[in-house]
Image (cartoon, rainbow, N blue to C red):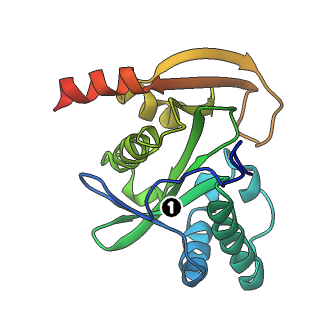
Amino acid sequence: MTGADGRCPAVPPEVLEGEQVTLRVWAVDDSEALGDLVLDNLDRLRPWMPWAAAEPLTATERLGVVESTVADRASGVASTYGIWWTGRLVGSCGAHRRIGLGGLEIGYWLAADVTGRGLATDAVATLTTAALALDDVDHVEVHVDRANGASAEVPRRLGFELVSALPHELTAPGEVGIECIWRTDAARWRRRSAIDG
């Protein structure tokens, strides 16, 4: 993916510090830790993540997944991060260039045993701030199936606006087929930050 000037789009920094969590882009050395975390949380992930419905990945396949996230970052397509809390890997989030010019879509998931602490909210807030600091990004979206109420609470808490709820193709077993799109733009995010600050 290249811009009009032939260069890859800018990406957020490799490491981002939130109030509670640290986001660090996936590296090849993380493939085993990521695989273990996914295996420990398959029951939580399978209803919502199409990639989790398949058989558990082999070590070689896990390495391939991480290598593809490294390549996506190098090309500016996406930046995918491990979410670290108190020195422990607890989830993943990423900013993806798949919603058109000027936008990044953020996706995320957490390990079951750390939910309810505001970690996903902190991770998404941290990544949103970094995304909106990029020169070519003016809005950030979170897309979530209507049935995934827990995931929808994150953009709601952060002051994103629900801009649409439209039918979409089912991709995971927990979905009802209504995709809710939550959006914030730079001006809305600045207002929210000023209120919270």
Give whichever of 193, 144 is nearer the camera: 193
Outermost residue, left side: 197
Is residue 187 in sight in this rendering? yes
Q: Is residue 102 above or below residue 95?
A: above
Quadrant position of the C terminus in the picture:
top left
Give left or right: position of 66 versus 156.
Answer: right
In the rendered image, residue 187, in percent from the top left (x then y), is placed at: 37, 21
Q: Secondary structure at mark 1?
A: strand
Outermost residue, right side: 169
Name the amino acid, label 1: Tyr
What residue do we see at 69% from left, 68% from top? Answer: 71
In the rendered image, residue 15, in percent from the top left (x then y), is placed at: 39, 64
Quarter of the rendering containing residue 80: bottom right
Outermost residue, front side: 5
Give left or right: position of 126 versus 7.
Answer: left
In the rendered image, residue 141, in percent from the top left (x then y), is placed at: 55, 31
Quarter of the rendering containing residue 32: bottom right
What residue do we see at 44% from left, 37% from top? Answer: 132
Per the image, the residue denoted by label 1 is 81
Give whichever of 10, 161 is nearer the camera: 10
Disc 1 packing (10 Å; few <14; some 14–19; many ≥20): many
What residue do we see at 61% from left, 79% from top? Answer: 31
Is residue 159 in sight in this rendering? no
What residue do we see at 47% from left, 56% from top? Answer: 112
Number of marks in picture: 1
Give left or right: position of 44 versus 81.
Answer: right
